[in-house]
Image: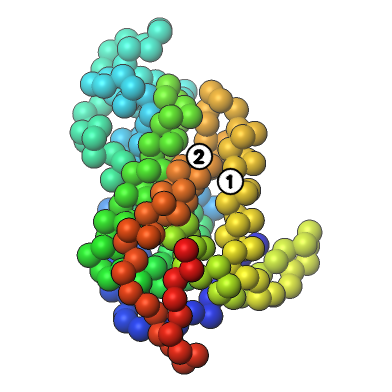
Amino acid sequence: MFPLKDNIPTDRFPVVTVVLIALNAIAYLFLQPKTGIDISGGSLHQHDLVHYGFVPYEFTHWGQHCDLVQSGAVACEGMSGVSGHAEHQIATWLTPFTAMFTHAGLLHLGGNMLFLWIFGNNVEDSMGPARFVVFYLIGGLAATALQLAFGPNSTTPNLGASGAVAGVLGGYILMYPRARVVTVVFIIFLFTILELPAIFFLGFWFLQQLLFGALTASDTVAGGGVAYWAHVGGFVAGLLLIKVFATRRSTGADGPRFPVY
């Protein structure tokens, strides 16, 4: 399923949502060194993927860094059979933040930003710009924390805004469970466009993350290149924190709408 838009208008222009989208786009297009353009992913230089992504091993083995070796694998200081030192890189504590603004390809970036635009503008509208910045970052950090808990020794770099965006989705599903989401539904080689209740669309998305996370091999955690437990962590943080951060009603053409907790 692929969302196109929802039916909940906003009362205020979503400044932070637009700025976050712009920052992610600028970081990918102009700041991330590329090995070439590949819309399916992998266009980020692989060494930078390790340096600017969040690597769980570096947090559970503080002071020991990881890097890409000639074989294409990730090797970390302190691992059995590994000698020498990793290339100089940014401080480990910064990587959960740099990872939120680093993407592996245009499809990776575009998918995250589409979800952020569709659902983020309403969540920002409910709490205002300053609160939304904090809410968004906490969602990203919660995503990182759960991914770390499920794979503390993983050397797989985690990157992308999806954990923070998942926090936005968790807040949205409680606020607007009856909102309608215009969705492209793919059935093998065919597709159709449906209006689905937000509670169904986002609930199905969350159950997918739980299922795929449970099926993921424990040694890599990021099954198929997707950090499912990060999505779960961000989503749950959004569910738990939306009552704290949402402070106002949203009004539209059909009158006031109250958040549904």
- Mark 2 Cα shell of 10 Å, populated few (<14), some (14-19), many (≥20): many
Q: Secondary structure at mark 1?
A: helix
Q: Which residue is mark 2?
A: 229
Q: Which residue is mark 1?
A: 209
Q: Quadrant of residue 76?
A: top left
Q: Which residue is farthest top?
A: 81
Amino acid at the residue labelled 2: Trp
Which of the pair 29/93 is nearer the observer? 93
* Location of residue 70 in the rendering, given as x and y in whole percent from the top left corner: 42, 24
For residue 100, the mark is: none
Q: Compared with residue 3, is residue 10 higher up or lower down, i.e. above or below?
A: below
Measured as percent of width and height from the top left, residue 1 is found at 65, 62
Q: Is residue 10 depicted above or below 144 in this figure?
A: below
- Kindly indicate the quadrant of the structure image that contains residue 52: top left
Q: Residue at x 64, y 56 (%)?
A: 204
Instruction: Report whether residue 46 is seen.
Output: no
Point 46% across, 48% down: residue: 236
- Which residue is found at the position 49% from the left and 79% from the top? 8
Foreground of the two, 119 or 74: 119
Query: How far is the residue under mark 1 from the one under mark 2?
Result: 7 Å
Image spot of residue 65 (x, y percent): 29, 24
152 lies above or below 147: above
Q: Is residue 193 found left or right of 67 in the rendered image? A: right
Q: Specify the color scheme.
A: rainbow
For the residues labelled 1 and 2, say whether their Cβ atoms are less than 8 Å apart: yes
Residue 201: % across, % down: 62, 63
The first of marks 1 and 2 along the sequence is 1
